[in-house]
Amino acid sequence: MNNNMKSTIAAIAITLALVGFAQARKVVVLSSEEITSGVQRAASGVPVLRSAMKDPNSFVLEGVYLRPPNKQGISDVCYSYRAHNSYGGYSGTGTARLNSKGAIDSVGSSSDDELKQALMPCSPLVQSMSLDVTAQVNAILHPTTAVLVHSLTRADRQAVVDAMNAKMQKEGVAGYVEIAGDMLTVHSERATPLRWHAMLLNKVEMDGLYQMEITTLAYTNDADQKFVYDLTKNVEVK
């Protein structure tokens, strides 16, 4: 087989893979229960992945992502990470999958060829089409560092809101945060059910709201999406 034929086959394979990924993106719908379960599974898989490294102490978790659930409601988990190679240095970002059977597989690195990388179950493209739960998993793995804000008083609230607005601007998000009484409202063009449930699972942010004595959290795109959470009862307001 000549090089042209090999290139053609590789191009076709990559095209088919991209089509498959695009189709998968359309069906990424996770309920709050599926997200909660997925985050717990993802956190439980990190020690297993770390132990598979040549130098476990060098392991750095960079990202955790949930894929669409299977018929049993179980999501594959994708990880991106760094760890020392055989020469004792970092050679790039690796990827791995925690499959629906609870096993770590498809471990690879950025040094793999493009075709192999594109076809991996947890390639960077797949991760971009998945739900990012890195913050939630880190909050479980590192509970002592999860609370960043301590005993905020009412006088501190506006400073926190200003910081949240500055963060949204820095990230290029069209929207703003405001506070009225004991209710904090996040206006964002990106408001979706998935982002809403991810927000509720973010222990750092929720702890901060409790310490600010916020009783009601609202998240809206000021159009067709609005979500409300009662922090005093720990329930969503339908």
Image (cartoon, rainbow, N blue to C red):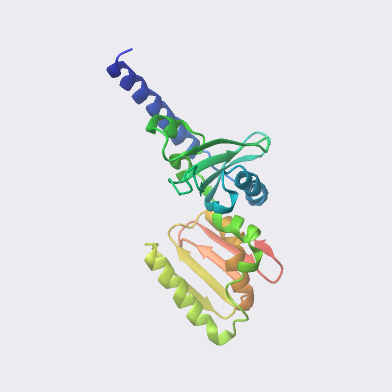
Residue 2 position by quadrant: top left
Residue 9, compared with residue 91, is above or below; it is above
* Residue at x 31% of width, y 16% of height: 5
Q: Farthest residue toward the right?
A: 233
Residue, far left:
4
**Relative height, residue 36 to residue 116 (above, below):** below
Q: Nearer the viewer, residue 173 or 139?
A: 139
Residue toward you, 202 or 9? 9
Horizontal arrangement in the rendering, residue 92 relative to residue 203 (left or right): left
Q: Position of residue 24 (x, y in %)?
A: 50, 35
Return the residue found at the far top. 1
Residue 36 location in percent, x, y? Answer: 66, 52
Closer-to-camera residue (211/178): 211
Q: Does residue 16 appear in this view?
A: yes
**Which quadrant holds the C terminus?**
bottom right
- Residue 79, percent across and down? 54, 45
Q: x, y percentage for residue 47?
A: 65, 49
Count of numbered circles on the image: 0
For image coordinates 50% across by 37% down, the residue present is 108
The quarter of the picture where the N terminus appears is: top left
Q: Residue furthest bottom?
A: 155
Q: Residue at x 59, y 67 (%)?
A: 204
Name the foreground residue: 121 vs 202. Answer: 121
The answer to whether residue 238 shows anywhere in this view is no
